[in-house]
Image (cartoon, grey):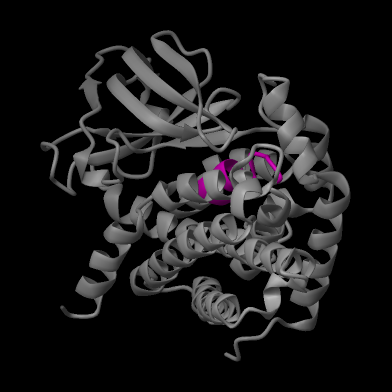
Amino acid sequence: MALVLTEEQQLLKDSADGFFTDKAPVAQLRRLRDDKDETGYDTGLWRDMAEMGFAGLLVGEDHGGTGFGHVGAGIVAEAMARTLAASPFMASAVTAAGLIDTLASDAVKADLLAKIAGGDTVISPALDEKSRHDLTATATRAAKNASGNTDGDTYTLTGAKTFVPDGHVADHFLVLARTDGTPGDTAGLSLFLVDKGTPGLIVDRTVMADSRNWAKLTLEGVQLPADRLIGTEGDAFDGVDAALDRARIIYAAELLGIAQVCLDTTVDYLKDRKQFGVAIGTFQGLQHRLAHLYSEVETARSAILKGLQAADKGGSLAWFASLAKAKACKVAELATNEAIQMHGGIGMTDEYDIGFYIKRARTVQQLYGDFYFHSDRFARQSGY
């Protein structure tokens, strides 16, 4: 497939770019941060996004979504990144929806996917437990309690989760827990749906560098009925990793949006900023750096679009996902660093918006595998 957008995808891009520019400028994130907003995003914006169909891009029409696909979700993620629009889109409409679509039964899909697509329910994935992403490091335990009565079996979950996106406002959590095996094993992992307010569930809000709200979950003997198990007991690893691969490419698209706006903003600044009576953009050394950055951004764009197209076709995505995320991490780091440096002193000030982009980039770079995680995984997928 050609690495260009179709007519429908281009229309979505134009619509998304205009929507977020108009309704969610960077000033909105700054205001949310300064006001220490407890929700962390504008609920009115999230309703408008749902009405635009953005929350249902990865949900099929039979479940109330638009079924536009992963290229569409990547387009929206990139548009959101340009203005740093805060919303539960990535956590709920991308990652959680993908996990449910991959692992859940038809009945659970029918119940939850429609709510996600309508923006009525926020579901957050609670997967990681360490400072670095590693599903096999899961130590949270889910002990099965056999019951001799008509109520059926139950599970008791004990452990902790970190880096849970929008966890402080989520209605439900998708918690990865170990029903068998020991940390380091891929076998024995199971996924559970845990409701907000369940006894024993403690949610601690964590405001991170990107001015978004994350959460730490503590599960102290959380009791769940057996029907809260998503998929097959002890067999969740492959499904979770496959769903994350699709989400990783969309997160790569968000990093691409950050890199692109840093490039565009820096080019504009170098055209205006003058030294010795001339625009600093005429200095050959800076032109070389911008040319290098431009080529890197376009290379990342091709890798990400190819990955999104592959996700829409189906099949194994590990190679594409790690290529896209690793490349996007490196390019976003280069773009944000270059933007800060070329803006000089003002680039370091809070009054200038560039600082918001570097903080968001560093957070997304770590989520579900950083550059080192994915470059190693890509090498292994390539036979090294």
Front in this rendered view, residue 233 or 246? 246
Total label count? 0
Percent x, y of residue 157? 30, 20
Q: In this view, does 30 lie above or below 11?
A: above
Q: Is residue 153 visible?
A: no
Check the image and name the residue furthest to the bottom. Answer: 2
Magenta residues span 85-95
Residue 100 vs residue 126: left or right?
Answer: right
Residue 338 vs residue 267: left or right?
Answer: left
| Residue 269, quarter of picture | bottom right
Residue drawn 67% across and 23% down? 39
Front in this rendered view, residue 48 or 313? 48
Percent x, y of residue 209? 51, 34
Q: Is residue 104 above or below residue 176?
A: below
| Residue 182, quarter of picture | top left
Residue 171 vs residue 379: left or right?
Answer: right
Q: Is the magenta stretch mostly helix, strand or loop?
A: helix
Residue drawn 41% across and 61% down? 245
Quadrant (top left/top right/bottom left/bottom right) for the C terminus: bottom left
Residue 207 vs residue 7: left or right?
Answer: left
Residue drawn 27% across and 21% down? 159
Residue drawn 36% across and 50% down? 240
Is 91 colored magenta in this rendering?
yes
Quadrant (top left/top right/bottom left/bottom right) for the N terminus: bottom right
